[in-house]
Image (cartoon, rainbow, N blue to C red):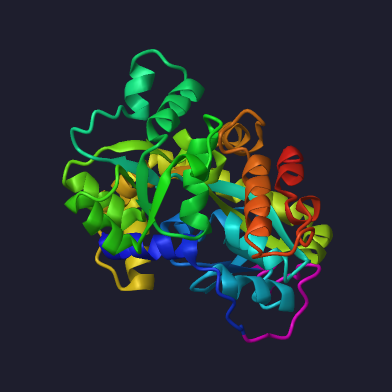
Amino acid sequence: MKKALLFSLALILAFGLIGCSSKSGDAGKAEQSGTGLTKVTFGLMPYYDYAPWALANEKGFFKDEGIDFEATMFPVEGNVAPALINGSIQIGAFSDTPSITLAAQFSDLQMISFHNVFKGFAIMGKKDSGFKTYQQFVAEGKDPKQAAIEVANEMKGKSIVTTSGATFYMVVEQALKNAGLSTNDIKIVDMEPDAGVSAFISGTGDFYLGGLPQREKLQEKGYPAIISGEEIGSGAVILAGLASTKKFVDANPELIQKVEQVWFKTMQYMKENPDESYKFIADWSNKQSGGTNKPEQIKQFLQDYLIFADSKEQAQTLFYDPKSPTYWKDRYESLVDYHEKTNVIKPGSVNLDNLVVAEKIFKELK
């Protein structure tokens, strides 16, 4: 399981741009294949987040929509973006942070849908520290917003062991921002994740924030998650879905609608056939990564760390409701602001109206 967790974390943290070989072809209007179906070339990555697309193909859901699905595997989004631009693929699996950093280089890139929320980040506390968790505040009658504020107030004046960089710092900043605080109100002990978690166990710091392997290690030893993922807000989640190019989106609106229908049909199948679905995902991911994960481990991972939008109603609630802690626009505005402040992208280099067309496409779904 640890190996799979590391692969999933790589999805979140890997932004490196690696060259991709070009194929001949046109990423504009999709063409008919020899079977009479419309051929769509997909770029996937070997992570649980994107396994439902492989399941959809296995069950014939693409063919039901008249689509001839052809998948190419990529290690990270840094490979997917240039493949989209040069026409090697037409649609690619993608998540939010790389879409910001790569959109600054590839202005034709567009996020066309959101399908899942990674909620695995968690600020961990010491055992028997006296700090209350978010869930304890909720159990006492606090509403979710007030519970998040109470947790932030507990952090004021304390120290947190974490690792510098956008992924972790944004989580800390969001947690503090809930109560009108900033990183000036706490002490950050900057250490690499593995060294940091060892130091935390040895007594350094009041709180800890790292990756999934470190979170699981602490939880196994009885350290509590004080607040996590979607409880914190937009700075502490990852939104993932599909990307394409403006050229392809403009030329194939009906096809993109059909791809969205495939997703929700697959989600319905997974709800009705959970055991078979977990086995498929385990087998598929093991084949891609060389892992040995079991269906029950896949089930636990998905329950603990991912939220799949399993219906149009849930997609609306998760991604397109301005009141949602995972509202896409809040998340993207936070990402742009952070990356501009840290000089990762130039101010004004990313236009969200051009980059994210997912909400417009979703509203047009039949």
Left or right of 26? Residue 263 is: left
Magenta stretch? Answer: 21-40
Q: Position of residue 319 (x, y in %)?
A: 61, 39
Residue at 32% of width from left, 23% of height from top? Answer: 136
Is residue 128 shown above or below 64?
Answer: above
Is residue 270 shown above or below 33?
Answer: above
Residue at 29% of width from left, 65% of height from top? Answer: 3
Location of residue 210 (image quadrant): bottom left
Location of residue 341 (image quadrant): bottom right
Q: Position of residue 316 (x, y in %)?
A: 63, 34
User: Is residue 204 highlighted in magenta?
Assistant: no
Residue at 80% of width from left, 50% of height from top? Answer: 353
Of 22 and 229, the residue lying toward us: 229
Left or right of 337? Residue 272 is: left
Secondary structure mainly formed by the magenta segment: loop
Residue at 69% of width from left, 68% of height from top? Answer: 90
Of 356 and 42, the residue lying toward us: 356
Of 249 and 359, the residue lying toward us: 359
